[in-house]
Image: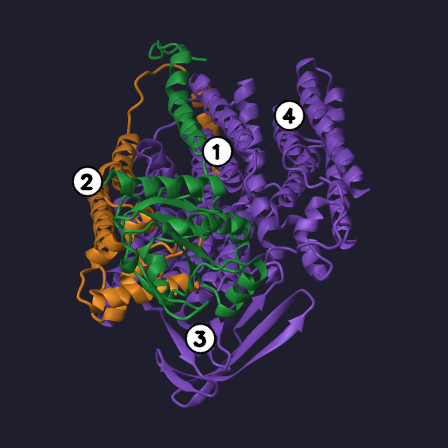
């Protein structure tokens, strides 16, 4: 090798200069590990809930969110083809049973499904809270629904106090309902 | 039984991989050639064992052996045999089995290819390949094993994902992609071997050239089939969505293309050594990044497999490759000085350097765009999306600059061009560009159309002119007819003519894509049975909706007749397929492919929904030019095959007459 | 050698012209006129929430169709495209936009190609400038192999 006066810098320094950005790159990739890439952060929490007035299909009538101002409302987007919706059904039913006397309203909003399928689901699994259809998915879009089941807890003042994507469990639901009920007493 | 056979075979293969790596290095360092030979034998045996493991899984699938979790999850009794075979690679674990099969194949091919004559670095290269094999074997034995057994044998399987049993293209898309990705392991291994031993002559480039071209051709075909699959199967009317996994498959293709050009500069002038080593390390690293992003569930994509714990393992391997590869290059910097410099910017070497730089800019654009959501979330906690609008906007200008260089490159000779020679050669292509640009502009093509079709004409004219020059020289020298002159010219310089054919193929594909982008139209239409409607210049009539039961799915078909100006053009039959395990139906579009006889226009219908009264909603697309994309891609692959075609050692004594004739053509001033 | 410089200049100018034209072309968009076209343009920039990386315009899913209807309804009611986009961003977050807004850190991916081409041109220019060999004397091994390579090159065509 021809001796070259230019290269006085020790080799390990040039190696380090090359490797440092690569290490940073690897760390960046590592930051993505363990996160669910499909999960979105909650956007609407704290915002006023979008108004809707939707027709029931389990009985006559409509459910209008404006009329329910002053009560805690739990809005659950679901469909009969959705497996986690089956899993959370018992929790919803239990919470409904416990809190309906205190004026808490549970509403199931059907998402991308047929009424026949939905009624079959209800006949199979039970429940008697109001079920509504969502023509044109306008309520779903207004609530930013992207993957059912999605459950929103709306406080008596009309703001969304909690949101969960994916099957809820009884503990979470009761805690959020309690917290929303308390906000009335504090106001 | 298959689980036992498969797992044992893979475990033995892993042991052989570790043995082979060790034996190669020990053998070469202690000067014991027989130990190195034993490593070669280990390579063959490793391949054989991986074949056995694949056959074991195949047997389990065909025999409906639902004691294996993989079979129960990805196959079912009702699945047709063809798709049972495809189930071997249609999910994470099984496709990893295929990956190991291809890797084992390359390993034994390398062992076989260098059985007699081999470079000094061969044992080290073999060791690197054994090391890579060991990693992927470890994965398929451990966390991602397909041979996991269920506690209770299932009655029936769930069947493959509906999208993966909808179309036979699934048969060839992964194999070609893997042949492409994994093929780059060979030049990578020889590069690392050269760096590790300090024998950084250009041998590693020469020795691996055909392997690199083969990998490139397979990757090109794999990407093309992916686009074809997206178009013919997914039903959204498009062929490339800039999905993260699509992007990471494109990245090694971009750097691989850059590499194929810049190694020519190294072979001729001894320059760009560090550059080429970095490119091949980068290309291989990008293939590992590809496996990481696809299987490590970092990004959401149409391809990502289920959540698994292997993310950290892939990342560790990627980090090792990056740090080891680039570290070695930095370490050996002194030995890698170029032997020459660029004489002038007006030479083929300079254009190749420019092409490399632009390809790298494209690579970084796509890479940063794909990874950016991770960075944004890490820094701000917010999720952002980087999708088609971003990539189309940013990649297109760079691609157009690349096209410009593609035109100039073949026109400039190596070393230096005289100005008048350059001008002379540029005349015809420049005129072709101007005329085409004006024609497109006059017919309302918009700025984008003028630029891209003008450039396409420029490149095509330049490539054809260069080929014509070579053929002319042959004719003058030997007095041959055109056909034999072409054969003669090509056989004397495979690389050049193969490369020019690749350029032409790319231009055809670019023309197709640009035409489609500028002129495609679509509409969503709902028709009752028997109803006729005017849509995008055609009349559509819904003749009826029917359903049929197949063993593994229920198919609802809408029969459409398409008219133009009252005359029947084609009957389309888009369908919806409902699979038992899935709640949502998967649509299969119906396509009338464009040919030169019908104006090169694809008519494309996809069924969205049917209603109870026999009516249907569907989307109707009029896509001109898409056919050119497939044709162009095929021509590119063909050009690559021509470029890499193995011939006997080049004759060193050229007939004097031919020499003089060619010299005159190329150097005329 | 001014002829060579002249043709280099010519090619350089052509290169720049192509680049600028391409930039201009990708920036220009057909001014959409009808409500349908404007809705389609907005929908092309929104991500379908239930699909993998498809835009609302491209997605065959039912929700995408309903979102498109929502966009058309809002446009007919007189809202501006930015307001329609803001409507979706408020509910789904920035994620719903298929191209990141050019603000703050989000500028980074947009700058990569621009900086890349500029920096790349500078790197290319500095690398291809002819450097005259400085030392005389007998040929070193690298020069020897270079000579051999040149001799080989003379034997080969093209």
Q: Is residue B154 above or below residue B119?
A: below
Query: Alpha carbon of mark 4 to alpha carbon of mark 3: how far?
Result: 59 Å
Residue B118 or B136: which is nearer the viewer? Answer: B136
On the image, numbered disc 2 is attached to which residue? C2
Query: Alpha carbon of mark 4 to alpha carbon of mark 2: how far?
Result: 53 Å
Indicate the quadrant containing the N terminus of chain B: top left, top right, bottom left or bottom right: top right
Tell whether B12 sits left or right of A153: right
- In the rendered image, what is the letter of the chain coloured orange? C
Q: Chain of mark 3?
A: B
Is mark 4 in CB contact (under 8 Å) with mark 2? Answer: no
Q: Which mark is residue A34?
A: 1
How packed mark 4 is, by other alpha carbons closer than 10 Å (few <14, some 14-19, many 20 or more), is many
How packed mark 1 is, by other alpha carbons closer than 10 Å (few <14, some 14-19, many 20 or more), is some
How packed mark 2 is, by other alpha carbons closer than 10 Å (few <14, some 14-19, many 20 or more), is few
Query: Alpha carbon of mark 4 to alpha carbon of mark 1: how far?
Result: 33 Å
The residue lying at 33 percent from left, 35 percent from top is B381
On the image, numbered disc 3 is attached to which residue? B617
* Residue ranking furthest to the front: A101
The residue lying at 68 percent from left, 46 percent from top is B70
- In the rendered image, what is the letter of the chain coloured purple? B
- In the rendered image, what is the letter of the chain coloured green? A
Q: Which mark is residue B127?
A: 4
Query: Alpha carbon of mark 3 to alpha carbon of mark 2: how far?
Result: 67 Å
N-terminal label among 4 and 3: 4
Same chain, marks 4 and 2?
Answer: no
Residue B151 or B665: which is nearer the viewer? Answer: B151
Tell me residue B480's x, y (percent). Answer: 53, 61
Circle nearer the viewer, 1 or 2 = 1
């Amino acid at each position: 090798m021809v001796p070259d006066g230019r290269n006085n810098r020790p080799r390990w320094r040039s190696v380090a200069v090359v490797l440092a950005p690569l290490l940073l790159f690897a760390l960046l990739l590592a930051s993505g590990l363990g996160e669910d890439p499909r999960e979105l952060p909650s956007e609407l929490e704290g915002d006023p809930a979008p108004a809707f007035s939707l027709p029931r299909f389990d009985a006559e009538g409509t459910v209008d969110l404006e009329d329910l101002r002053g009560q805690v409302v739990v809005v659950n987007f679901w469909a009969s083809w959705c497996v986690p919706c089956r899993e959370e059904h018992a929790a919803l039913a239990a919470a409904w049973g416990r809190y309906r006397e205190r004026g808490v309203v549970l509403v199931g909003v059907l998402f991308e499904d047929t009424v026949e399928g939905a009624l079959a689901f209800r006949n199979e699994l039970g429940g008697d809270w109001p079920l509504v259809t969502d023509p044109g998915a306008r309520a779903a879009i207004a609530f930013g629904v992207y993957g059912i089941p999605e459950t929103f807890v709306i406080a008596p003042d009309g703001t969304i106090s909690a949101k969960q994507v994916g099957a809820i469990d009884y503990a979470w639901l009761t805690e959020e309902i309690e917290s929303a009920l308390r906000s009335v007493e504090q106001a | 039984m298959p689980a036992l056979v498969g797992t044992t075979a893979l475990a033995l293969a892993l042991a052989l991989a570790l043995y082979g790596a060790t034996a190669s290095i020990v053998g070469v360092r202690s000067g014991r050639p027989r130990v190195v030979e034993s490593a070669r034998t280990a390579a063959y045996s490793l391949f054989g064992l991986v074949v056995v493991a694949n056959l074991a899984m195949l047997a389990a699938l065909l025999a409906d052996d639902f004691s294996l979790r993989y079979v129960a999850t990805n196959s079912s009794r009702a699945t047709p045999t063809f798709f049972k075979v495809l189930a071997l690679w249609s999910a994470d674990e099984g496709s990893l089995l295929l990956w190991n099969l291809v890797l084992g194949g390359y390993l034994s091919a390398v062992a076989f290819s260098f059985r007699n004559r081999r470079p000094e670095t061969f044992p080290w290269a073999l060791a690197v390949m054994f090391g890579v094999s060991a990693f992927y074997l470890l994965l398929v034995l451990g966390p991602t094993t397909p041979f996991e057994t269920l506690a209770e044998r299932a009655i029936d399987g769930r069947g493959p994902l509906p999208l993966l049993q909808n179309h036979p293209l699934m048969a060839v898309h992964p194999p070609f992609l893997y042949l492409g990705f994994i093929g780059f392991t060979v030049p990578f291994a020889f590069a690392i071997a050269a760096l590790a031993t300090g024998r950084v002559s250009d041998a590693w480039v020469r020795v691996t050239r055909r392997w690199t071209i083969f990998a490139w051709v397979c990757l090109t075909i794999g990407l093309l089939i992916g686009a074809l699959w997206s178009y013919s199967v997914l039903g959204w009317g498009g062929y490339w969505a800039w999905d993260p996994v699509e992007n990471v498959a494109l990245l090694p293709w971009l750097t691989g293309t850059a590499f194929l050009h810049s190694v020519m500069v190294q072979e001729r002038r001894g320059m760009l050594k560090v550059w080429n080593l970095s490119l091949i390390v980068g290309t291989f690293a990008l293939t590992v990044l590809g496996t990481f992003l696809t299987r490590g569930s970092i990004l959401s994509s149409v391809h990502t497999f289920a959540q698994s714990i292997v993310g950290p393992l892939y990342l560790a391997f990627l980090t090792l490759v990056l740090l080891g590869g680039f570290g070695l290059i930095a370490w050996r910097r002194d030995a890698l000085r170029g032997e020459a410099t660029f004489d002038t910017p007006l030479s083929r070497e300079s254009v190749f350097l420019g092409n490399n730089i632009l390809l790298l800019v494209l690579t970084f654009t796509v890479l940063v765009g794909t990874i950016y959501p991770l960075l944004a979330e890490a820094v701000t906690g917010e999720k952002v999306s980087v999708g088609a609008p971003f990539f189309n906007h940013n990649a297109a200008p760079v691609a157009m600059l690349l096209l410009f260089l593609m035109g100039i490159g073949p026109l400039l000779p190596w070393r230096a061009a005289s100005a008048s020679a350059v001008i002379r050669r540029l005349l015809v292509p420049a005129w072709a560009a101007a005329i085409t640009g004006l024609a497109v502009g006059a017919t309302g093509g918009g700025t984008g159309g003028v630029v891209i079709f003008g450039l396409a004409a420029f490149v095509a004219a330049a490539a054809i002119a260069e080929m014509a020059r070579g053929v002319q020289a042959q004719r003058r020298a030997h007095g041959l007819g055109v056909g034999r002159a072409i054969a003669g010219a090509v056989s004397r310089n495979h690389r050049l003519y193969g490369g020019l054919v690749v350029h032409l193929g790319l231009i055809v594909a670019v023309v197709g894509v640009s035409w489609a982008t500028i002129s495609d139209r679509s509409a969503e239409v709902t028709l009752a049975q028997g109803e006729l409607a005017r849509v995008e210049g055609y009349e559509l009539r819904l003749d009826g909706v029917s359903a049929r039961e197949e063993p593994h799915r229920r198919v609802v078909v809408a029969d459409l007749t398409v008219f133009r100006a009252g005359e029947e053009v084609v009957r389309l039959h888009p369908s919806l397929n409902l699979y038992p395990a899935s709640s949502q139906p998967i649509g299969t579009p119906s396509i009338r492919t464009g040919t030169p006889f019908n104006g090169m226009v694809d008519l494309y219908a996809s069924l969205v929904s049917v209603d109870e009264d026999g009516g249907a909603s569907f989307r109707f697309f009029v896509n001109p030019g898409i056919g050119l994309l497939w044709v162009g891609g095929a021509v590119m692959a063909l050009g690559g095959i021509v470029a890499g075609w193995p011939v006997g050692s080049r004759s060193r004594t050229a007939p004097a007459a031919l020499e003089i004739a060619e010299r005159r053509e190329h150097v005329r001033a | 050698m001014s002829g060579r410089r002249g043709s280099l200049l010519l090619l350089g100018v052509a290169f720049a012209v192509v680049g600028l034209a391409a930039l201009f072309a990708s920036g220009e968009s057909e001014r959409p006129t009808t409500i349908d076209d404007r809705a389609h343009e907005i929908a092309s920039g929104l991500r379908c929430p239930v699909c993998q990386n498809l835009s609302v315009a491209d997605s065959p899913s039912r929700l995408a169709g309903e979102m498109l209807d929502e966009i058309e309804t809002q446009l007919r009611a007189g809202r501006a495209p930015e307001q329609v986009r803001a409507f979706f961003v408020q509910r789904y977050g920035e994620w719903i936009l298929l191209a990141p807004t050019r603000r703050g850190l989000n500028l980074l991916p947009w700058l990569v190609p621009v900086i890349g081409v500029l920096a790349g041109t500078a790197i290319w220019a500095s690398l291809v400038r002819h450097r005259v060999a400085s030392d005389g004397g007998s040929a070193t091994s690298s020069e020897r192999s270079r000579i051999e390579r040149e001799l080989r090159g003379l034997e080969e065509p093209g």
